[in-house]
Image (spheres, rainbow, N blue to C red):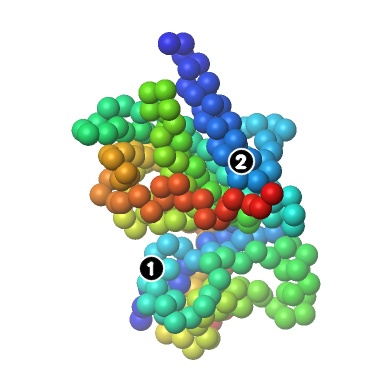
């Protein structure tokens, strides 16, 4: 597997999340200069704008399920913005995509700073999610509430 | 005297976003069950400039909106501080006014 494989996986995750938004009736755009994993999501009527950062990983076997490790920048995690950022963690498990973990920047930061999920290394936060049956955990924290949490982007009427 | 209230500041091209630190929100969370407060406030640079021209510093107003606390209650908490969350640089400290 080439050293660039992770770049391809990352881009695949970005596109599959974009596809999910489109299927729900929300428009999507990529920045002209793509410095990261950002996706802009727009509600065509009204112009509501959302910033999404997609993080993608490949699953590894773990217990009865699998695990995936993601890396994000601490500076971005800590900084409030308007509109604020939402992280979507996409995991490739075998030949399929696993459940999307959808969590707002502030909620994720609260989980890290108050409940000690993840580990810091050189200005990055490393998160390891464990997926078992229909449950998702990060450290000792139950992340199942964030599993496929699309409520902010309901399927729009056609 | 209780811990100081921390407001985190995110500067962007068109304005500033203010939000309570996670620790401050946890500290105030019993109040938030009965008080309706916004999770964050965005103020454009233009609005900030106009407001401060006529009414003075915006900071105390921002912290009262984010916390639902009045001036006396803020004092009882030990005051407040505005910081940039990436480096904890203090941008404003209410004690500096006293």
Residue A59 image position (x, y, % from top left)? 36, 28
Q: Residue A130, labelled with which disc?
A: none
Residue B25 image position (x, y, % from top left)? 43, 68
Residue A70 image position (x, y, % from top left)? 41, 35
Chain at numbered mark 1: B
Q: Residue furthest front?
A: A158
Instruction: Please state if B57 lies on the left or on the right of A124 as rendered.
Output: right
Residue A93 image position (x, y, % from top left)? 38, 28
Q: Residue furthest left?
A: A63
Out of B69 and B32, give the one closest to the viewer.
Answer: B32
What residue is drawn where x is 52% and y is 31%? A13
Circle 2 Cα neighbour tier, 10 Å, few/some/many (<14 / 14–19 / ≥20):
few
**How many numbered marks does the figure carry?**
2
Dot 2 lies on which element?
helix
What residue is drawn where x is 27% and y is 34%? A65
Q: Which residue is mark 2?
A: A23
Out of A153 and B92, give the one closest to the viewer.
Answer: A153
Q: Quadrant of residue A132?
A: top left
C-beta proximity under 8 Å, tags 1 and 2: no
Picture layout, residue A5 above or below residue A60: above
Q: Quadrant of residue B51?
A: bottom right
Instruction: Please state if B30 lies on the left or on the right of B98 as rendered.
Output: left
The answer to whether residue B82 shows anywhere in this view is no
Discs 1 and 2 carry the same chain letter: no
What residue is drawn where x is 46% and y is 11%? A2
What residue is drawn where x is 35% and y is 49%? A143
Q: Which residue is mark 1?
A: B26
């Amino acid at each position: 597997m080439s050293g660039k494989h992770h770049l391809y996986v990352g881009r695949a995750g970005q596109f599959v999340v974009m596809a999910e938004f489109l299927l729900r009736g929300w428009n999507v755009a990529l920045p002209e200069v793509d410095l990261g994993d950002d996706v802009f999501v727009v509600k065509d009527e009204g112009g509501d704008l959302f910033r999404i950062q997609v993080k993608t990983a490949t699953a590894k076997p773990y217990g009865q399920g699998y695990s995936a490790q993601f890396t994000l920048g601490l500076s971005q995690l800590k900084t409030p913005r308007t509109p604020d950022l939402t992280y979507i963690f996409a995991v490739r498990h075998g030949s399929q995509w696993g459940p999307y973990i959808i969590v707002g920047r502030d909620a994720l930061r609260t989980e890290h700073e108050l409940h000690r999920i993840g580990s810091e290394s050189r200005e990055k936060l490393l998160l390891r999610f464990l997926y078992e049956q229909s449950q998702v955990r990060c450290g000792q924290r139950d992340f199942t509430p964030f599993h496929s949490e699309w409520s902010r982007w309901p399927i729009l009427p056609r | 005297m209780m811990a100081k209230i921390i407001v985190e500041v995110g500067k962007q091209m068109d304005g500033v976003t203010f939000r309570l630190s996670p620790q401050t929100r946890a500290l105030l969370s019993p109040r938030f069950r009965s008080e309706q407060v916004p999770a964050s406030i965005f103020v454009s640079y233009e609005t900030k400039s106009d407001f401060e021209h006529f009414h003075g510093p915006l900071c105390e107003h921002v912290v009262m909106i984010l916390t639902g606390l009045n001036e006396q209650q803020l004092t009882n908490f030990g005051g407040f501080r505005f910081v940039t969350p990436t480096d904890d640089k203090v941008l404003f400290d209410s004690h500096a006014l006293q």
